Image: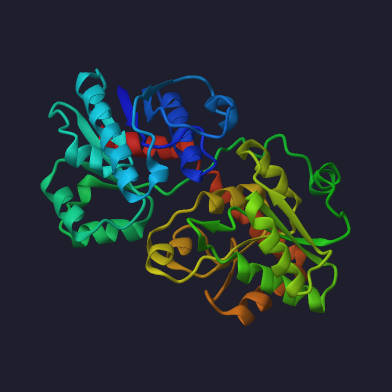
Amino acid sequence: MKILYVANIRLPTEKAHGIQIMKMCEAFVKAGVEIELVVPNRRTPITEDPFSYYGVERTFVITRLPTFDTVSWGRAGFWLQTLSFIIHAAHVARRSSAEVVYSRDPALFFFGRMPFDKTLVWEIHTKPTPHVAEKIRKSRVRIVTISGGLRAVLRKAGIPGERITVAHDAVDADLFAHVPDKQTVRRELSLPEDKKLVAYIGKYKTMGESKGVEEIISAVGAVHARHTDTELLLVGLNQDEFFEVEKLTKAVGLDGAAHLVGHVEHRHVARYMRAADVLVMNYPDTEHYARFMSPLKLFEYMASGTPIVTSDLPSIREVLDDTTAYFFKAGDAADFRRVLERALADPAVASERARAALEKVKELTWQKRAETILKSLA
């Protein structure tokens, strides 16, 4: 089988979807499929080759198509770039010998005039509008969702269950294979060896919107006020965010007890996860986060073997439970602090939950995800 994977993204990109797409292409190849990844020839500040940047084997072809690089112009520029890419990508798809066209962009299928002799697969990461859901129902497009919550929405819209496959996001099984123990990593990264480090790995904001990191800073500040050996580690800040984050950490009493790190290439991020005593996720209780998401961070946290403290949402409960993580009520600052203190106070119990999460994530790899999707297409 040959799959044409069409992705309208900058490549490489510092965003998580670049990791997911490259890792899935690698996994499909390992499962015996020929892959051609088609992307636009957009400018990117990352000059490194995509295969080395993401630590992916050079086992598939990347084809770059001409496009108007106008996303920075705003909404009109976004649509101009999208339409120019779809026109070229649809032309490539119609001429390709691939049996399957796979994409995360519905516009390709609904406006690209795809040929009828190919299997079309749309991987959905957000709730579709009723209009798009109706188009899916009337089409022949197969669906891969990243959560059971998204599947439920599609089933309610009348899309047959046999056309929908749930495949949560996943992790590279080898991501932590060569990462040394916590104390060694801390020495190498110049992090304190005698402190309890609470870490968040990821962006401070997305599209200018909060990701709950302010609440993480406040929670760690409250714990630090009671237990001064607890410190904060934030990894993944943009350069223009440092000043604001430093002000926040000082305001909550973490001056000198906060370790702020800028963007780290994905192949190095595992070292910071291994360095932590606790890894935190603080997603808000909104419809998308609560029902539909499947964050890469979750699976990488699990694979790190480090205890996890997370907001309690149905989407997270699809993967984790009380034997594999600590949960606090989303939006409840006092509960966040209490649960964080509990995880830090009993390392033996915390380590047991971390080991259980590590064992579970062995079945949640990119390779197994690719095999699940291919089985659904057979």
Answer yes or no: is residue 25 visible. Answer: yes
Question: As drawn, which residue projects farthest toward the bottom?
Answer: 334
Q: Depth check: give the residue in front, 301 or 219.
A: 219
Query: Along the line of sight, which residue is nearer the eye, 31 or 231?
Result: 231
Quadrant of residue 328 within the rendered picture = bottom right
Q: Position of residue 283 (x, y in %)?
A: 51, 65
| Residue 229, quarter of picture | bottom right
From the viewer's perspective, tell me whether residue 228 is left or right of residue 375: right
Q: Quadrant of the C terminus?
A: top left
In the rendering, at what x and y percent does residue 181 appear?
79, 44
| Residue found at x 76% / y 64% | 347
Going 30% across and 34% down the picture, which residue do you hit?
102
Specify whether 271 is left or right of 30.
right
Does 34 sit above or below residue 44? above
- x and y percentages locating residue 94 in the rendered image: 19, 23
Taking depth in this image into account, of 241 and 104 the one nearest to the observer is 241
Q: Position of residue 76 (x, y in %)?
A: 30, 47
Q: Indicate the quadrant where residue 349 lies.
A: bottom right
Give left or right: position of 62 versus 254. Answer: left
Residue that lies at the very extreme toward the front in this rendered image: 73
Colour pattern of the rendering: rainbow
Which residue is located at x 68 percent, y 73 percent?
A: 219
Examine the rendering and report whether any part of residue 343 can be seen: no
